[in-house]
Image: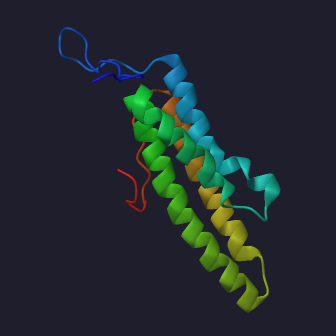
Amino acid sequence: MLTINPKPAGEDSDGKPQPPKEHEKIAAVIIHLAGVFWLPLLPMPMLALVVPFIALQFARVHSDFAEQHAVQACNFQMLMGCFYVLAMLAGFALKTPLFIWWVGIGSALFCMWQAARAINGWPAKYPVTLKVFK
C-alpha cells in the first residue's frame, strides 16, 4: 500500500525515543497558544478549538510529539468551551461578566503553562480535560 506521508520512525537504532525537533516544539507551542489568541475577540471563544483541531489532523501524520500536544489541547479546549457556556449562562442570570473573565484567565494561564512545557520538549498534560480525542 502506498503511503503519501509516512510517520517518521520514533526510535533511534538503540531503541530510545528521539527528542522532539525544534519545528515540532514550535508547532506544539502554537497549538497551545491558540487558546490565548481569541482573547482580543471576546465574542468568539470557540476559535480556540479551531487551530488545535486542524493541527491535530496534520500532526497525526508527521509528529508524535505534536500529535500528543494537539490531542491534549483539543481536549482541554473542549472542556473550556463547556465552562464558557456555563459562565455565559451564569453571567446572564446574575448580570455580570465576571465569570467569563475568570474562565478566560484560567484558560490562558493553563495554555501558557503548557506552551512553556512544549518549548522545553516535555509532554503535555493538562490537569483536567475531557477525553474526546485520543
Residue at the left extreme, as displayed:
14
Q: Residue at x 44, y 51 (%)?
A: 126
Answer yes or no: is residue 95 visible. Answer: yes
Q: Residue at x 51, y 64 (%)?
A: 79
Task: Choose between 50 and 84: the one closer to the eye.
Answer: 50
> Horizontally, is 4 left or right of 119 in the view?
left
Q: Quadrant of residue 93?
A: bottom right
Q: Residue at x 48, y 40 (%)?
A: 57
The structure's colour scheme is: rainbow
Q: Give the vertical position of 77 relative to 43 (above or below).
A: above
Q: Quadrant of residue 89?
A: bottom right
**Residue 41's spot in the image, x, y percent?**
81, 56
Residue at the front extreme, as displayed:
1
**Residue 87's spot in the image, x, y percent?**
65, 77
**Residue 42's spot in the image, x, y percent?**
79, 62
Residue at the top extreme, as displayed:
13
Q: Give the vertical position of 18 relative to 27 (above or below).
A: above
Task: Choose between 7 and 24: the one closer to the eye.
Answer: 7
Q: Residue at x 43, y 26 (%)?
A: 62
- Location of the N terminus (image quadrant): top left
Task: Choose between 87 and 81: the one closer to the eye.
Answer: 81
> Horizontally, is 73 left or right of 15 in the view?
right
Answer yes or no: is residue 122 visible. Answer: no
